[in-house]
Amino acid sequence: MTLETGWLDETPITDSVLRGFLYNQADVGDLVAGAVGGRTARPPGVALADAGGPVVYTNQAVLLRPVLTAVDPLLDEVDRFFADSPPAMLLSAWPTPDLSVRGWQVIGHPMFVVRSPGAHAAVVSEAVSIEPARTAVDLALAERVVVQGYPLPEAAGLSPNALFGPGLLDGPIRVRIASVDGRPAGVGSAHVGYGVVNLCLAATLATARHRGAWTSLVWTRVDDAPDLPAVAFTSDDSRPGFIRLGFLPITRFTLWLVPGGR
């Protein structure tokens, strides 16, 4: 009898919050890539999405099980998929062996944070307003805010909707734009699925920080499914803000840059 590890192919996706997040994030990659005509694949153990652009966060491999050696065949699947693609990012929820022997480069260890379901007492500034992206023009505005606020200089010259394709409209990923005093200030997106609310992207313009836009975007997305845990993986810059809002730091992920072929 095979003992349950939490990461078997037949393990229920909702076996744990972490497993639910990984499948949620895998779907986010598929949806973002699909909206711009990109490629996706889902061999056992890994989810692969290639949006075809220069932003590694939209060319993503999400491991769905631990990798214990640098010669795991799963990693060959990743190399094959991105062989003729721009650089990509591999997300592992676990520590990995040294994958630099494959020509990959470690690029970060973001913190995975979780907030339990439940009510919250949010205080939102009257100067902040939040609207969903309803048109391709709205998505193009959201792109500009993300490129400037994150920042993503490698995407500065892309044509409108190269990152947020119109295929995202009316889909399961909700993209919202926060304004402060009537001016675009920040962007936040969320995806509900597999038992979690995934706060899957956020960026705030430098000129609008500490004015309530980021916090308002967090609570708006949490309220997409207040009966579910809210999750995110976050930089050390944003981590204190999440902690102040009741999120708990659970574990650090590992991100690797996969060089691709172009």
Image (cartoon, rainbow, N blue to C red):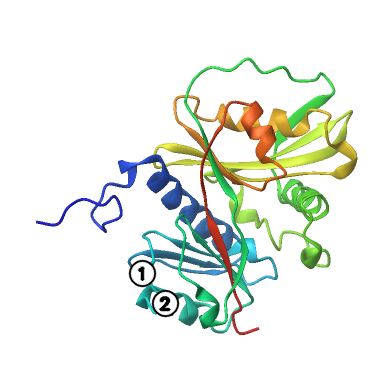
> What x and y, as percent, mark residue 237?
72, 44
Amino acid of disc 1: Pro
The residue identified by callout 1 is 43
C-alpha separation, residue under disc 1 versus residue under disc 2: 8 Å
Mark 2, residues whose alpha carbon is within 10 Å: few (<14), some, or many (≥20)? some
Extreme residue in the left direction: 1
Q: Indicate the secondary structure of the residue bearing disc 1.
A: loop
Q: Give the answer, above or below, for where 237 lies relative to 62.
A: above
Residue shown at 32% from the left, 66% from the top: 44
Q: Indicate the secondary structure of the residue bearing disc 2.
A: helix
> What x and y, as percent, mark residue 221?
60, 33
> What x and y, as percent, mark residue 35?
59, 59
24 relative position to 162: left or right: left
Residue 248, visible in the rendered structure? yes
Mark 1, residues whose alpha carbon is within 10 Å: few (<14), some, or many (≥20)? few
User: What's the mark number on residue 77?
Assistant: 2
Q: Quadrant of the N terminus?
A: bottom left
Amino acid of disc 2: Glu
